[in-house]
Image: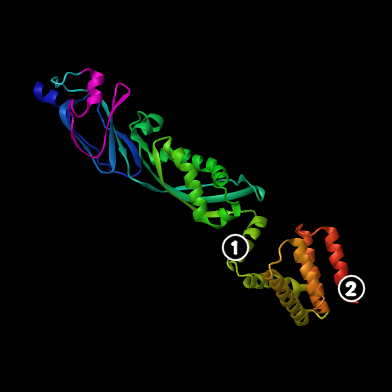
Amino acid sequence: MGLMDFIKKQFIDIIQWTEDSDGTLAWRFPMADMEIQYGASLTVRESQMAVFVNEGKIADVFGPGTHKLTTQTIPVLTYLKNWDKLFESPFKSDVYFFSTRQQVDQKWGTPQPITIRDKDFGAVRLRAFGNFSFRVADPKLFHTEISGTRDSYGVGDLDGQLRGLVLQNISNAIASSGIPFLDLASNQLTFAKALSDQLAPEFAKIGLKLEGMTVQNVSLPEELQKIMDQKIGMGMVGNDMGKFMQYQTAQAIPKFAEGGGDGGGIAGSAMGLGAGVALGQVMAQNLSAGLQGGVNQAAAVAAQAATVKPDDIMATLEKLGELKAKGILTQEEFDTKKAELLKKLV
């Protein structure tokens, strides 16, 4: 091999990255002791960007296309090396390629229940999981903040940090959304949007763009899950008060049937059914008349009780007891209405 052949092998004429595998975010072109030939060809594909680094400083960033490397196409590098435009010498720089393809189906989840604060329920412990997708949007920032001078930097190297970002921002996402937690938990699309809005600026700080976020499951404590199930059930009937009372009555029938009447069995179930339907009719009439507030509701229930049967009065007392247990009625108000209803049995 002649001397000239040996020298030519030290010059690089074509610089490109074919991405022979998935999951690589940054890749350094192997320079070894070689130099880039003046006028060499740099090929950057549609799903890539390239960064030139000279003596530890980022000189230029190239987008998709074929670029001829001259003092005109890399003016920053020209300035750093103080080249004259007529000086056409090979030069040595590090070249990093970045994949800008969307990285899909990245998993996130809560290994342990996390505690969040909600204005309705105070502290709530939950588990959740889903997935997200992202891409490198600012290779210069990603290089300086994350990938650095490594030969290769993959999605797996970033996985732990991104999962951590998701977990530490769940509480902030719920708080900043201003939406009650139960509404978020019962609507996974709303939850995912709130989380995405919170995370997008955090991803941007390291040169990434969050492309999508999903919440596939939210696991709540049993008592909170029951409340959410009831909320969903009531939401199904909308603003139709008649349907709302039918729903409430249907919910109450099993409880009436369990202990209603001395006959037990079929007789008890029948009496419970009758009491539940009667109570539903009474409450529907009151609500449709526009009565509001716990005290007004209790007064209306008591007034209607004067025209109903003894079994209906007992059912009304049970309803008043529920209002008292929920804090809508005070003990004094409950005792007053109870006395009035019991007089009807005499």
Residue 301, given in percent of the width and then of the height, sits at 77, 70
Q: Residues within 10 Å of mark 1 (few under 14, many from 20)?
A: some
The percent coordinates of residue 312 (x first, y second) are 79, 76
Name the residue beneath numbered marker 2.
Answer: 343
Q: Nearer the viewer, mark 1 or mark 2?
A: 2
Q: Is residue 153 left or right of residue 182?
A: left
Residue 328, above or below 15:
below
Give the left or right position of residue 135, taking residue 6 as reference. Answer: right
Count residues near mark 2 (Cα–Cα under 10 Å), then give few for <14, some for 14-19, many for 20+: few
* x 35%, y 43%: residue: 23
Amino acid type indicated by mark 2: Lys
Q: Which residues are magenta?
A: 53-82
The percent coordinates of residue 170 (x first, y second) are: 54, 44
Q: Is residue 24 visible?
A: yes
Q: Earlier in the sequence, mark 1 or mark 2?
A: 1
Cα distance in 3D space between marks 1 and 2: 39 Å
Front position in the image: 13 or 207 = 207
Kindly identify which residue carries mark 1. 232
For the residue labelled by badge 1, is the local secondary structure a helix, a strand or a loop?
Answer: helix
Out of 95 and 185, give the one closest to the viewer.
185
